[in-house]
Amino acid sequence: MQTSRSKPCPCPSFKLREVASMYFTMVAVFLVILVVALQGSAPRGSDFPYKVPLDPQGLLELSWNVSYPQQVVHFQLLLRDLRFGLLFGMSDRGEFENADLAVLWSDGHNSYFGDAWSDAKGQLHMDSQQDYQLLGARRAPEGLYLLFRRAFSTCDPKDYLIEDGTVHLIYGILEKPVHSLQAINISAIHRGLQRVQLLKPNITVPELPSDMKTMEITAPNIVIPSQETTYWCYMTELPADFPKHHIIMYEPVVTAGNEALVHHMEVFQCAAEFDSFPHYNGPCDSKMKPDRLNYCRHVLAAWAMGAQAFYYPKEAGLAFGGPGSSRYLRLEIHYHNPLVFEGRHDSSGIRLYYTATLRRYDAGIMELGLVYTPVMAIPPGEEAFILTGYCTDKCTQLALPAAGIRIFASQLHTHLAGRKVVTVLARDGRERQVVNADGHYSPHFQEIRMLKELVAVFPGDELITTCTYNTEDRSRATVGGFGILEEMCVNYVHYYPQTQLELCKSAVDPGYLHRYFNLVNRFNDEEVCMCPQVSVPQQFFSIPWNSFNRDVLKSLYGFAPISMHCNKSSAVRFPGEWEKQPLPTITERLQEPIPHCPSAPGPRPAAPVPLNLGPLRKD
């Protein structure tokens, strides 16, 4: 066994350290050559249809595209003012702790790119599995372009799973050189958050008619208030005797230079029951805003930062104008101005594309979920409290046509405590299909989202909407209602053909809730006042929220009968018995999708990729 040592080797002898040094040098040279080669072909803007500014100043701009066959997102970052690097990534709700990051950093001489993650304390670590794959980097007059890709699912426990719904993107700017990834102190850098829907559906754009016209509903050159958050309301009206038309498309109109300040916009049509509405142009929360504007709540268009143009299916259009339709419209714009810019003028809004050549179907909007009522409540201090609203088979059997309806878009909605929302279609007691789901839902990012495929709903089907809430920062119960500190659980589904059914929602039976208050009184030392003059919110506010009272309330919502609201557009219920209805019985649930793990294209060492970016700015 020792003879092999004693035989002289005719080959040159190398020390192990020298061999390793040569190997890693060759790898580094190869990576540099690869990156330089990739830099030769500049990414074209047309390759990245989606775009959003990341920071309020517009110094960082993200563009991306989605490949569903490859299950990959391609990112293009434009850094207009590169200093010593950038952190970009994703986390559950925009935190920098437990985040999945792509990092570009420089020590002042050399630059590096790598896939990293942060732990619960915010310390950065190089990922052992490099799933942010650098494709190229190039300088241009407008800044540095960085091109990289990331699979939806990597099956790396340190990586974020990219899925349908809201994605919280995070960024941080390195203003000083750092000698290693671990030397980056994320608490000391300029950083921020942007929310987007990364996985946009591949929608075939329908052919637009030759008689199509446009109408711009825009703010009248207002001055954006110098405060972080403003909701601005502006009233306008359609021309007199404006006949019925179909809206077939709409898109945002954003004043140049304000792209990072205009967060989202909506156009509402007012209730037809009023002959006139006062003109108003000012903050939506102002005491000067006329109360009648609260009756302008029928959504015609909604846009959020990062969204593209919205197209109706070729078979349908949203009717506006004509008999029974109000002429009055309300534009609402959310300005997000964290740097408190002053004197910014804005004329942003939404451009409607409409036609007098009516399509085959009028599109409709139906409300699903929970009724706006305080009987549905969330105890304080809850991490993930679930409430569910039902559109029952009894209602759809009565209100939908035999051929059913087709849902093509959806807008999920809660107030500040909402964290997740999902609507599921059930048929014959079995869950069949997810209509829309957002596992990282944010009340600060609401848009009408086109579905990847039409959802067919037939008479006898059930639509079940479930919302998850977090009230860890609250000291008293949160009840359902219209106030921003009250809660909602709604899915506005857009469908065709339009029916008389405008609202299909539920709430727990009030009698069973009264029994709950009685039970709380019986088993707790502190008395819950149930006097007739005491409101339901006050009764909830007086409950001592021990584990028993919490668990019994959860149980109540899980078995008690419901009050069904199966309502026409006139707010009148369809004829029938709607009180004390049994909860739908679901015998088969949809299985959670299993993430697809892509096959590795080759060895991806847990080492940063060196980049030759030339001298970096030091001022």
Image (tube, rainbow, N blue to C red):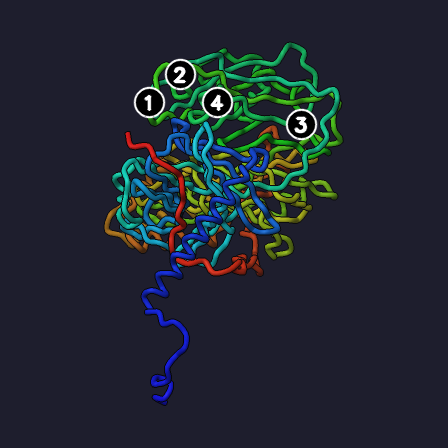
In the image, which is nearer the foreground, mark 2 or mark 3?
A: 2
Nearer the observer, 184 or 152? 184
Q: Secondary structure at mark 4?
A: strand
Q: CA distance from mark 1 to mark 3?
A: 37 Å
- Disc on res. 332: 4
- Of the image marks 1 and 3, the number of the one nearer the N terminus: 3
In the image, which is nearer the foreground, mark 4 or mark 2?
A: 2
Amino acid under disc 2: Arg
Label 2, on which residue?
344
- Disc on res. 340: 1
The reply to whether callout 1 and callout 2 are in contact (CB within 8 Å) is no
- Disc on res. 248: 3
Nearer the observer, 548 or 336? 336
In the image, which is nearer the foreground, mark 4 or mark 3?
A: 3
Q: CA distance from mark 4 to mark 3?
A: 21 Å
Q: Is residue 18 left or right of residue 421?
A: left
- Of the image marks 4 and 3, the number of the one nearer the N terminus: 3
Q: Quadrant of the C terminus?
A: top left
